[in-house]
Image (cartoon, rainbow, N blue to C red):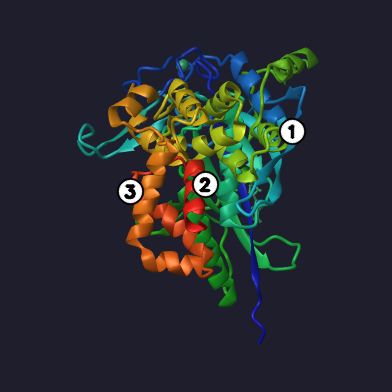
């Protein structure tokens, strides 16, 4: 019997926190990290009689995100109540949007590791409020479960992707790209650990060539790109094994357990009927004017895709360097400043994508760099004036990173400058040739590849300081004499 080949079908839902100062329906601070239940008021506690009032900044950010994703912005959208009981949801319902969301029908171009680009459709992006947080166990709780409502009412944008993704790797790349897009337009801080960018993955499989979709499993609340990839890989393998053995995939909700390295069933998948959605009576329809949308559109912004295009087309960078540089707005900003200042974008990209990126750390939109722009510009200047070879520049960089030193101070301290004096280099070359008579004979007998060996030996003797151009000329003259 011929074995059927199966194809994964994946659609991702992302909850991105909008970076407003205050919550979406009240004036409590939206900031993370405060002591439990200090950012609360009658509205976000769901006390009787308290009414929601929509945060204008949250709408502006949602529109900005929608435009960045190429969505149509509905001029009239509606809020709805999604009803369910959970202790972290004090009202007993979540205010969300249902059949008339703010943003619809967009797409995101996702560069893949193999150099191709995949366009993933965005079905909709709608506004909603976050729930609180249940805390189980722990020292302070004395075995009880506690609820922290600081997060209740924080504005979220739920971005529902179409089932256009075909592998776990594509899913992770899509998420990286979506996160970058939201960070570049300043509406989300991209902080997965703090939960401001979270993902649900919907996974199904179908016989390759079939156009119908299989039954999907939803994996909830995955908060790392690596986990997303592992969870999807596991789930796809599990579903293929199930259907190949003649079984059926059950429509359930699961969670990823990274310690066990598997998905576990959480509950039977709820349908939208279960939530008894109805129009939110406490909020009028959300109307956004053309002028409002135009004002958001007019704000300067440069998306990762636009920057990548500029980097490769105008600055001559490789696709891969352009992709790496646009993973974080701060990285792109550092690169652009260094390229501007030194007039050498390719070299700037090379250094930023390698040495600098290694020591780069980000916490949401905040970032720290191992070196300053001044230090990098100083390094480039000393390469340009011939004081440093590429090899020496790397040594200087290693001592520069994490210090306030100037490039010149590091050079002076170590006595690292290129030796350009031809007679000094010639003396080193002669010593190398004298020490290796057999190789010299072989070279003269036609083994030209040995040239690299001789140069390497000279570099070893000089601690990498011989000027490569002078060395080339001197060694060739001696060997071919
Ligand atoms: P729910 O809220 O119940 O998860 P939604 O319609 O909001 O339902 O979300 C559907 C998500 O599931 C979308 O991201 C969509 O791309 C994805 N999806 C729908 N059908 C499939 C399928 N057969 N396989 C994989 N993903 C799917
Ligand atoms: Mg879902
Ligand atoms: Zn409040």
Mark 2 and ligand 1: say if the CB distance to the nearest ligand atom is below 8 Å. no
SS for dot 1: loop
Residue marked by disc 3: 461
- CA neighbours of label 2 inside 10 A, class few (<14), some (14 to 19), many (20+): few
Residue 258 spot, x, y in % from top left: 39, 54
Name the disc covering residue 473, or none: 2
SS for dot 3: helix
Mark closer to the observer (3, 2): 2
| Residue 470 or residue 27, whichever sits in front | 470
On screen, residue 429 versus residue 247, left or right, reads left
Q: Quadrant of the N terminus?
A: bottom right
On screen, residue 211 versus residue 266, left or right, reads right
**In this rendering, is residue 92 above or below 261?**
above
Residue 479 spot, x, y in % from top left: 48, 57
Mark closer to the observer (1, 2): 2
Residue 433 spot, x, y in % from top left: 38, 58
Residue marked by disc 1: 70
């Amino acid at each position: 019997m011929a074995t059927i080949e199966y194809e994964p079908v994946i659609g991702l839902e992302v909850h991105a926190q909008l970076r407003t100062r205050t919550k979406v329906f009240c004036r409590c601070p939206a900031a993370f990290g405060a002591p439990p239940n200090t950012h609360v008021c009658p509205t976000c506690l769901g006390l009787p009689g308290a009414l929601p009032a929509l945060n204008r900044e949250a709408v502006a950010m949602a529109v900005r995100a929608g435009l960045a994703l190429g969505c149509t912005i509905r001029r009239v959208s509606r809020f709805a109540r999604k009803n369910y009981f959970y202790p972290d949801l004090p009202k007993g319902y979540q205010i969300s949007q249902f059949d008339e969301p703010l943003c619809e029908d967009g797409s995101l171009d996702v560069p893949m590791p193999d150099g191709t680009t995949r366009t993933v459709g965005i079905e909709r992006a709608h506004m909603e409020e976050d729930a609180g947080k249940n805390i189980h166990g722990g020292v302070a709780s004395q075995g009880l479960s506690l609820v922290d409502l600081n997060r209740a009412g924080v504005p979220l944008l739920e971005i529902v992707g179409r089932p256009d993704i075909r592998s776990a790797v594509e899913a992770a790349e899509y998420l990286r790209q979506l996160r970058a897009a939201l960070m570049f337009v300043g509406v989300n801080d991209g902080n997965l650990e703090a939960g401001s960018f979270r993902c649900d993955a919907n996974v199904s499989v179908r016989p390759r060539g079939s156009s119908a979709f299989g039954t999907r499993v939803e994996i909830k609340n995955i908060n790392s790109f690596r986990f997303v990839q592992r969870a999807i890989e596991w789930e796809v393998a599990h579903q293929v094994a199930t259907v190949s053995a003649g079984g059926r995939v059950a429509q359930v909700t699961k969670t990823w357990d990274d310690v066990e390295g598997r998905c576990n069933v959480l509950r039977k998948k709820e349908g939208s009927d279960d939530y008894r959605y109805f129009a939110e009576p406490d909020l009028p329809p959300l109307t956004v004017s053309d002028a409002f949308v135009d004002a958001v559109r007019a704000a300067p912004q440069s998306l990762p895709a636009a920057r990548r295009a500029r980097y490769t087309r105008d600055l001559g960078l490789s696709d891969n360097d352009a992709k790496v540089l646009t993973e974080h707005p701060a990285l792109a900003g550092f690169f652009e400043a260094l390229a501007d200042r030194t007039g050498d974008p390719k070299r700037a990209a090379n250094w930023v994508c390698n040495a600098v990126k290694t020591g780069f750390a980000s916490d949401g939109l905040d970032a720290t760099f191992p070196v300053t722009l001044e230090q990098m510009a100083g390094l480039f200047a000393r390469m340009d004036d011939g004081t440093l070879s590429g090899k020496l520049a790397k040594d200087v960089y290693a001592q520069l990173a994490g210090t306030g030193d100037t490039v010149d101070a590091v050079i002076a301290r170590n006595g690292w400058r290129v030796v350009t004096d031809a007679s000094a280099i010639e003396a080193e070359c002669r010593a190398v040739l004298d020490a290796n008579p057999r190789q010299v004979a072989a070279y003269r007998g036609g083994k030209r590849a040995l040239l690299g060996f001789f140069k390497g030996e000279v570099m070893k003797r000089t601690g990498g300081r011989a000027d490569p151009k002078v060395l080339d000329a001197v060694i060739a003259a001696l060997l071919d004499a």
